[in-house]
Amino acid sequence: SSVMVADVLSRRGVGLPALCAGALIAIFSPVAHSGAPLVTDDAAIIEAKSCQLESWIEASHGARAYWAVPACNFTGRVEWALGGAGVNPADSPSSVWYAIQAKTVFAQGGNGFWSVGAVGGVIRDTGPVASDASSTTYYGKALLSLYPSEVLEVDLNLGGSNVFGAGATVTAGAAIQFAVLPRATLLAEIFRDERGPGKFQLGARYAFIPSRLEGYVSYGNWLGNLTGSSWWAVAGIRINTAPFLP
């Protein structure tokens, strides 16, 4: 979806610095990936009959995005997410994004050492320059998660997206989550979500109430571009409920 944001901003005449930064603003993968702020998904879904709410702010040199994404697991097999964002570029009209996503786990290894799943979804831009023919993105990817120890998780993704104005793109990601304390986890990933060089992200997550409430922050940029204006930063929270659905 960052490709989609870049295309929208370019059509609105945003300058190159804002375009590079804004291209990273509404990365929708965080709806169900291994916990925002990571773009790389894990092969896991929330508990059966429970729901989750993630809300975060994504800021960059040239834009701001405000996300709210509820998700529920009604049957125990598929996690459904339906959410949206307000995207506010500095030099062009604001836009509203809506997205729906489904995520499932196909298999798990003995003793929970590994799991395999898939995720897919659709994103729509309802901004002032969007049209019915050019405002939708489809994406999907295969997910593999490895759990070498109780404090270490490794996530690998491979998939693709079809973005208006940009065509099909191969996407990939690799992430590491390391629990340095019982409630604190350090995050690192490299990923490719559009054509061109890859990107990286570093962050941390803290569980205020284990399994129920946590907060996170992160910083990301293009690989090899630490001094450029294409950085982005994320801050948000995630709330998980106990099972309550019928």
Image (cartoon, rainbow, N blue to C red):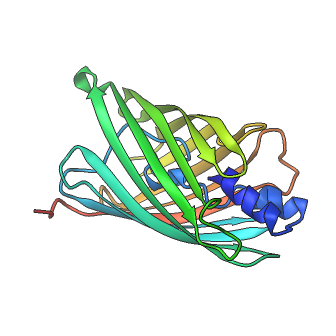
Residue drawn at 81 percent across, 69 percent down: 12
- Position of residue 95 relative to residue 40, above or below, is below
Residue drawn at 55 percent across, 62 percent down: 124
Q: Would residue 129 be visible to someone looking at this image? A: yes
The quarter holding residue 112 reads: top left
Return the residue nearer the eye: 136 or 67. Answer: 136
Q: Would residue 191 be visible to someone looking at this image? A: no
- On the image, the x and y values in percent for residue 179 come to 45, 42
Left of 18 or right of it: where is 100? Answer: left
Residue drawn at 10 percent across, 62 percent down: 246
Left of 134 or right of it: where is 85? Answer: left
Return the residue nearer the eye: 134 or 91. Answer: 134
- Position of residue 136 relative to residue 45, above or below, is below
- On the image, the x and y values in percent for residue 121 come to 46, 50
- On the image, the x and y values in percent for residue 169 come to 65, 37
**Residue that sits furthest to the front in the current view:** 133
